[in-house]
Amino acid sequence: MDERIEKLLLGLEELNKAGGQWNISHTTGQFLYDLIIDKKPEVIVEVGASNGYSTIWLAVAARKINAKVITFEFVPEKVRDLVSNLQKAGLIQYVQTVPDDANKRLGELEEKIDFVFLDGRKNEYLQQLKMLEPKLNSGAIIAADNVISHKHALEDYLYYVTNENKYRSELKDIGTGLEISYLLS
Ligand SMILES: C[S@@+](CC[C@H](N)C(=O)[O-])C[C@H]1O[C@@H](n2cnc3c(N)ncnc32)[C@H](O)[C@@H]1O
């Protein structure tokens, strides 16, 4: 990671302390980065970019392995900050930003998807996963944040990825809780 991006991430972490951004933890960002470098997905989809803190982690990894990130954010002020932060990081060319409701647009994706990061509204994770399922490559990885902090809101999602025999799923006790689910072939 170059110094400019490290500084930008640290600045965003300070901003996050003031509230309102709901960014993932540094540890979660590092974990997602390492997982992407290890598994080498070609197409990464993020739902809920906020100001782009998590998107930067995904995009730095994508740059290293020549992958592409598609991210959804529907609040106009957040989209403005997202684009500005990606430009500051020099990562804008690795990210397709979709300034719209993911629930309306996920079904239109034409790409086959290898990696998904769910971090929008917690009660929508399951419907978003189901919208993406026809487009997932075998072995695709689904990372879902807040599974400890929002355990109750995510009950249906967690039941689905752990009990339907479609995924091998494990909970990482980092940040607010990250569920990593591997699509079985
Ligand atoms: C928890 S924050 C995301 C934080 C970000 N992933 C990070 O760690 O830096 C959730 C964001 O998802 C956005 N969001 C929620 N539901 C969405 C949807 N259906 N489509 C697009 N954006 C959505 C919200 O506007 C909010 O900015």
Image: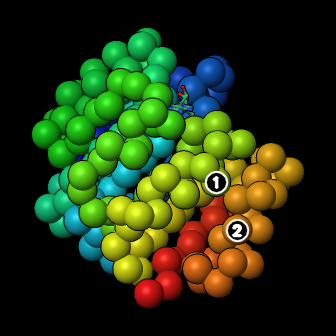
Tell me, for residue 126, which label it has, or none: 1
Using a 10 Å C-alpha cutoff, classify the residue at mark 2 as few (fewer than 14 neighbours), some (14 to 19) or many (20 or more).
some
Q: Nearer the viewer, residue 174 or 133?
A: 133
Q: Secondary structure at mark 2?
A: helix
Q: Nearer the viewer, residue 71 or 83?
A: 71
Q: Secondary structure at mark 1?
A: helix
Can I make out residue 83 in this image? yes
Dots 1, 2 in contact, CB < 8 A: yes
Which of the 4 quarters of the picture holds residue 93?
Answer: top left
* Tally of numbered discs: 2
Q: Nearer the viewer, residue 166 or 141?
A: 166
Can I make out residue 12 in this image? no
Tell me, for residue 160, which label it has, or none: 2
The residue sitting at 40% across, 25% down in the picture is: 100
Image: 79 above or below 184 = above
Indicate left or right for 98 with 169 as reference: left
Q: Which amino acid is tagged 1?
A: Leu
- Residue lying furthest bottom in this view? 185
The residue sitting at 45% across, 33% down in the picture is: 104
Image quadrant where one finds the N terminus? bottom left
Dot placed on the residue nearer the N-terminal end, 1 or 2: 1
